[in-house]
Image: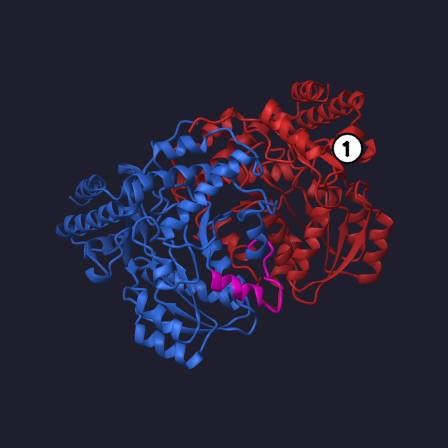
Chain colours: A blue, B red
Amino acid sequence: MPEAPPPLLLGPGPSNVPARVLAAMAQPLRGHLDPLFLARLDRVQAQLRTLFGTDHPLTLPLSATGSAGMEACLVNLLEPGDPVVIGVAGVFGERMCDVAARAGARVTRVEAEWGAALDPDAMAEALGRVRPKVVAFVHAETSTGVLQPVEEIARAAKEVEALVVLDCVTSLGGVPVQLDDWGVAAAYSATQKCLSCPPGLAPISFGPRALARIRERRRPVQSWYLDASLLAGYYGSERVYHHTAPISAIYALAEGLRLVEEEGMPARARRHQEAARALAEAVAPLGFEPLVPEAIRLPPLTTLRLPERVLRTGEADLRRRLLSEHGIEVGGGLGKLAGRVWRVGLMGENARTTCVDRLVEALGHLLA
Amino acid sequence: MPEAPPPLLLGPGPSNVPARVLAAMAQPLRGHLDPLFLARLDRVQAQLRTLFGTDHPLTLPLSATGSAGMEACLVNLLEPGDPVVIGVAGVFGERMCDVAARAGARVTRVEAEWGAALDPDAMAEALGRVRPKVVAFVHAETSTGVLQPVEEIARAAKEVEALVVLDCVTSLGGVPVQLDDWGVAAAYSATQKCLSCPPGLAPISFGPRALARIRERRRPVQSWYLDASLLAGYYGSERVYHHTAPISAIYALAEGLRLVEEEGMPARARRHQEAARALAEAVAPLGFEPLVPEAIRLPPLTTLRLPERVLRTGEADLRRRLLSEHGIEVGGGLGKLAGRVWRVGLMGENARTTCVDRLVEALGHLLA
């Protein structure tokens, strides 16, 4: 089937997948219990630990997308009636509340403006008042483009012995993540953002305190598929069958992680910062302006307020033309920000000024 | 990394993936909201309906493996306290009980010998006694190699207005499936068996009666990720974001389904039957004997009782040598049958007498 050439993916994910990763994914399959496949899985798990900044043994690519990673962390650590404090400053904080409530937890929300960071004092106040089992928040809020400082909230959590659950969907591989230094008990991410792999896997990590909490549960985890104790059977040293691991997606992730390793995380984080800075500068003359103050701006994903003329003529139409006429995808606003901002991802492979140049040139044409 | 050549995968899945499917998977990605991707997804959903033998609008490739398909069907249709009758004659019937119990359902088990089919009279008796909301059983039990006749149980379910949930993991694409004729309300499968695609997706189908039941729920579905009403937003006509669809895996499935369409399901089912018959005949002289009577034997997956000499020397060792010396993977027994049988899959691409020949030749060498 002849089709338009593949677009430059500058939305909130997926980002473009390097040829090496696509080629690795297309390798013939070995079985999910084959020792040669398991050796490769070992290496993937070790590389994910490095990237998450953790020694957590139970670190693995969950066989589903990032949202299932969120659900896995919350349903394993929460039981019906458990108090949980959740920071909400965008769609993914909201989603955490929904997921936790479905698990029967008593949710206390701490809200912040969309486009702002959570206030550590407000979080600390709620933690002291509620004394929750778990505190959950988003490191890199994909709906607003805010990079949340983690340490202060994690310190407050430690004081009340709450386990920290962190959403690293749009940070892992683009921004330094240090679960152990920060004291994060469980975290999740996704492959289609700063790792530049296809969507379909959720890297997740459960630390010793999370596993201890799971062992003390009064009732089984509501999800069989996401039950960390069962996952530990396959993703631990026993390698017993739980479900059939998505072999090809893991081949892709293995190659994506090799690319991260070759570049080194410090250089990769710098590249993301430089590309985001170049973007903000280059779109300013066209009337696009970052929503988020620079100090908490998330390099892999920039939310841009739209110029008046674009709001007047309809931002969706401009996005459609950007894709159909120039082969560039950017994301619209999500939730409260729908119609008001664009989300421009410069993630993984695409965190390059050449991508900024292509976008700005195309916008220049369309807005001329 | 130099590696051994890819094995012939004659276990219980994954089966070997055709080169056309691998190439389709390795295409550059489009976004999950890109109209050209959505057009392809439309076609995948239509082809899955054909293959499932259904008009169910909510038929889609779930973004997780077959076990999550099982969980999706059960957690959407069951609420805490709901009675459910489950047929148990192998590992996957057992798994259904576990999943349903975690959803808070009151489970009534109807058991049969592993290697036998469920007794429709026993199922009908339980249905009349319990009058459950849901009756769930396995069409093609991957742990025993039994193909369960569906119609009689489905008729009994209709009499008590129970919704039928059917596990089609090892039947879809290898054996005719007719959800609408049979009166099945919800069903699930997997991509790595008779569809010869990589593992990672679970084709699922919810019919109108299932959707009506979901609309009448008193409380939300416990899983956000698997909530059919939310999935309907993306996999229905609105195409609104729920989670990021696994684009590359869907490219692979699209090509796998095209291969099924080109061959035609009747010819494909015949090919599976012929290969299974050839296997049973060819291994008999070596002392391997089918566990399951021919009338209910599942063509895509044959369980073989092992000859005394193999039991004596250890079946695991022979399997290891088959893989390392001859590049052929077969499956060991699962659950109660561990150590007592092998599971030989002739699924999808591999349902060919040439695969039987390779296996028999290798076994001949190893047992000489």
Picture quarter with the N terminus of chain B: top left
Residue B348 sits in quarter: top right
> What residue do we see at 31% from left, 72% from top?
A120
* Residue B129 location (% of width, % of height): 84, 61
> What residue do we see at 48% from left, 61% from top?
A208
**Residue A212 magenta:** yes
Q: Do we see residue B136 in this rendering?
A: yes
**Residue A100 magenta:** no
* Residue B300 location (% of width, % of height): 69, 32
In what element is the residue under mark 1? helix
Picture quarter with the C terminus of chain B: top right
Pick whichever, B123 or A201, lies toward us: A201
Pick whichever, A352 or A153, lies toward us: A153
* Residue A283 location (% of width, % of height): 17, 50
Residue to which mark 1 is pinned: B312
> Of all residues shown, which one is farthest toward the bottom?
A129
Pick whichever, A204 or B363, lies toward us: B363
Q: Is residue A314 left or right of residue A69?
A: left
> What residue do we see at 76% from left, 23% from top?
B283
Label 1 resides on the chain identified as B
Amino acid type, callout 1: Arg
> Of all residues shown, which one is farthest toward the left?
A285
Q: Is residue B325 left or right of residue A343?
A: right
Q: Which residues are magenta?
A: A208-226
Q: Is residue A188 left or right of residue A104?
A: left
* Residue A46 location (% of width, % of height): 43, 46
